[in-house]
Structure formats: structure tokens, C-alpha cells
Image (cartoon, rainbow, N blue to C red):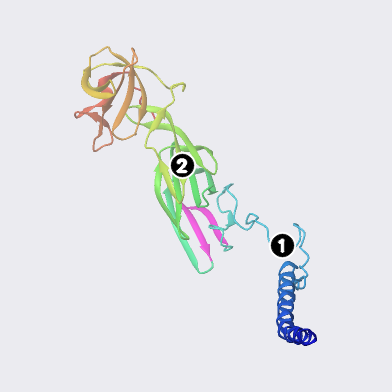
Amino acid sequence: MKHTRSCIFVVSIILLLILFPACNIVVQNNSEEQTKDTSQNEPVEQTQPEEQTKPEESPADSTAPTAAPNNDMPQPEVIELGLDEIISVDLYGTGDETMLELAFSNGLLVLHVSGDGYAHELLLAEMPDGYLTSAYYVHSFDGYPFVVASYDYISDDFETSAVRFSGTEPVCDFRLPLYVENIDELEFSAYGYLQAAGTWAAGTTVYFVDDDIEWRGTYVLDQQSPTYTELEVAKELPVKLLNNGEYEDSALLPGAPLSFTVTDGDTYMEFVLWDGTEGVFYFEWSGDWIETIDGVPVYEYFVNLPQFG
């Protein structure tokens, strides 16, 4: 019995020696897993970058750039010009000065244009017995320069010349047989007496568009003028009458009343009949500057056609 107990004791000791390292390993592994899980769940403290100091912002009215109009650009304007009077202008807003002068000598009206390194002279009109009525320098709303001059070139025969610029060189390729009545930075209106199938008080409007001069090509007769008169056909007159939006060939017989309304001054005259029908007839100019229809002087086609001037 005693021997048996001794054997049991020895065996127990051996088992303890075998099991103790294994338990130690299990305990270590459990400790490592707990440590690992704890480290995963804890927030990681991150190093924050140093805060950069922002430069102080300038107030809106300081040196910070702002969108503002270019005050150096010439503003739209109309400047009246006088004879032998020199004005300084900036033609295109470049800061370069250009001198303009209207001069009248020996019956010639001349525009002088000069600046740094250039000088131009433009003949506007020959008017041995005439005079300048008005003249203007215009800097248009589109930013381009013009000169407009009206003059009586001989015995109440008025004319207007409009000058545009090619660079600094003045170019005059537009004229009207009227004088300037009103002018601004967009347009000018002209008025006066017009010779076209009779003599009529008439007006028209001319526009400044970019660097060009635009005109619709028609004169409107002033029916309120004391010289205006309604007419009566004296001789069968070939015309075109407006019918449903289209002009059709027709003729007016002697005695037909009509009122002239619009003309281009060179080739046609529009009119209105007593019943409101609109029409047009065409005329030509003879070699001695008399208006004719089919070779017959135009005044033979009407009763008391106004002719004067």
C-alpha cells in the first residue's frame, strides 16, 4: 500500500512538470492577445501639424486689386469745332495726342490732322462764296473718332461731310446735301432742302457704327413744312402701286391727287394716293441736272411742282 502511494506521488510530480510549461505558454499567449486587442481599440494619438499663421487680409479699399473702369479711355463726347481753332484729342484711347484744325482759305475748307511723326491734310469742300455753318469732333459710343462738318458752299446750298479715320489718316467718303440739325455720340440728324422730283424740305439720320458711317439711304419729306404741297397729276404717270405687299405696274391719270413721302434723292420718289394706296415712280437726271421721266422733264407730269433754290 505504501509502495502504491509512492508511485502515485511520483507520477503526480511528473505530470506537474509536464503540464506547467504548457500552461505557462497558454497564459503568455492569452496575455499577448489581450494586449493586442487593447492596442487596437485604443485611439492612436496623432501628431498635429503646426498651425500656419495666415497673412492679414487687406481691407477692400486698400491695395488689393479691384475691378474698375479704365479712366484713361476717352469718354464718348461731342466737341464743337471752330475755324482756325486747334483741339487736342486722343483718337483711340492710347494716350497719344492728335491735333485737329479746320481751316478756310481761298475758298477751300480743309481739315488738318497732326501728331507725333505724322501730318495729314484733307479737303472737305470748295466753297468760294460759302461759309462753315457747324462742325464737330465726335468720339462715338463704340470708341471711334469722327469729324462732321456742315457748310453752305454757294448761295444757300448746304452740304455735310462726315469724316472717319483710318489709323490717324482722315477719310471723307460720305456727304449729304443737308446740314446737321442734331448730333450726339450715336448719330446725327440732317435737315434742309432737297432737289429730287421737285424741291422739298426733308430730313434723314446717319449713324456711327464701329469705325464706319451708316445711312439708310432715304430722305423723309417734311409734310409740316410751309413749302410742302400735295400734288395733282398733269400727264399720265407710269408708277408702281403696292398691292398685298408687292409692287405692281400701273399708271396714274391726269387729275389724280397724291402726296410725296420718301425719296433716295437720286432715282425714286414714294407717294401716297388719296385713298391711302402707296406707290413709287422712278426718275433720271439729264445731262444738265434736270429730273426726267421717260426723257420728259418731271415738272411736266405734275401741276405746280415746287421748284426753287
User: Within 10 Å of the Cα at label 2, are there few (<14), some (14-19), or many (20+) other Cα atoms?
Assistant: some
The amino acid marked with disc number 1 is Ala
The amino acid marked with disc number 2 is Tyr
Is 103 within the magenta?
Answer: yes
User: Who's the residue at 59% across and 54% down the image?
Assistant: 74
Describe residue 177's horizontal placement relative to residue 56 as left or right.
left
Please tell me the numbered disc located at residue 64.
1
Q: Main secondary structure of the magenta part?
A: strand
User: Who's the residue at 27% across and 11% down the image?
Assistant: 255
Which residue does the numbered mark 2 point to in the structure image?
A: 207
Q: Is residue 260 above or below residue 48?
A: above
Q: Nearer the viewer, residue 48 or 175?
A: 48
Please tell me the numbered disc located at residue 248.
none
Describe residue 264's horizontal placement relative to residue 114 as left or right.
left
Of all residues shown, which one is farthest toward the front?
1
Residue 185, given in percent of the width and then of the height, sits at 54, 44
The quarter of the image holding the C terminus is: top left
Residue 162, given in percent of the width and then of the height, sits at 45, 47
Please indicate, yes or no, whether residue 108 appears anywhere in the rendered image: no
Per the rendered image, the range of residues in magenta is 97-115
Splitting the image into 4 quarters, where does residue 256 fall?
top left
